[in-house]
Amino acid sequence: MSTTATTSVSPGGAAAPTVPSTAPGSRATGPGRPGAAVVHPAGSARLNFLGVMKGEWIKLLSLRSTWWTLGITVAVMTLLGLAQASSLQYFAEDAAAAGATLYGAEVVIGGYQFATVTIAVLGALLMTGEYSTGMIRSTFAAVPARLPVLAAKALALVVLTVAVSAASIVGGYLAARPALTDHDLVPSLSDSTTWQVFGGMAFFFMAAAFMALGLGAVLRHTAGTITAVLGLLLLLPGVLQFVQIDWVQDLVSVLPLPAAVSFLSLGDMLGSNELLSAWEGVAVVGAWAVAALVAGAVMLRRRDA
């Protein structure tokens, strides 16, 4: 099939516009004709949520910082689990003198406060890293609604924090098992308290990651976000605990880390929270995470990239 064009010459010698003509047997390709090629305007295509999720997952796993933070988290949990187990005899003596009960699951996750730092850093980098490189403009150009991007990042963090929590628990368990066996404290998977501690640690890791992600969307700066989230998680409770005023101590109890102690501490080994029950602590920690994500979502919608 072929298409020819004819050019007519005006009396003044000027060439008239070329008009395409269709040779016999050829197929018409003009607009509105059968077989016409339809050209969509630029930007009309939109990613669905699965596409957004896939993109965020690829970005997350392609960063070396992701693997470094995950590896450091597992290493910290394993080494501190070993350190706790090495001092288990002293903990046992103190617990016996105080009439308290020791739980092996608490020994296994003894390093969770330090590991929370690396998890929070990961959550912050997932958002602020795109602002520092300028990639966030491309991301929002592809997903103008913006909120699916935040949701996809949050879901990616859920998968990673559950995986790293499981790996950290296994590492801490293997490191502490010899000492736990000597003291008959090996945690049993048929014991509900074991699942409370292990599941509670994973939940707190996710909450810390969400807080960092939400604050990252608000502050848009890596150093500022990490400083803010670590100040909220670690510095603020440490400073305020020295202010011996009732309402200040009540405030300390509802900060994220002290609230997490309410469901992570079965005895007194990891501290205690006299204000909140275990389920109240879960609700408070969840509320902090949700508040950070909501603040991040609002700022994503209101401000330019």
Image (cartoon, grey):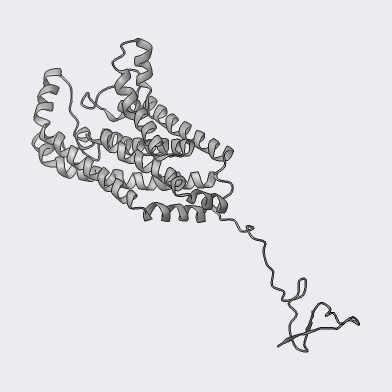
Horizontal side, residue 37 vs residue 75: left or right: right
The spot of residue 285 in percent (x, y) is: 39, 30
Q: Farthest residue to the front: give it.
A: 12
**Position of the C terminus by quadrant:** top right
Question: At 27% across and 38% down in the image, what residue appears?
Answer: 115
Residue 273 visible to the viewer: no
The quadrant holding residue 176 is top left
- Compared to residue 117, the image places residue 90 above or below, namely above
Residue 41 screen position, x and y as percent: 67, 61
Q: Nearer the viewer, residue 250 or 277?
A: 250
- Residue sitting at 73 percent across and 82 percent down? 27
> Viewer-proximal residue, 67 or 7?
7
Please give the name of the residue rendered at 35% of the width and 29% of the height, measured from the top-left corner. Answer: 231
Rendered location of residue 202, percent (x, y): 33, 39
Instruction: Find residue 279 and report its image quarter.
Output: top left
**Badge count:** 0
Residue 68 visible here:
yes
Q: Is residue 273 left or right of residue 137?
A: left
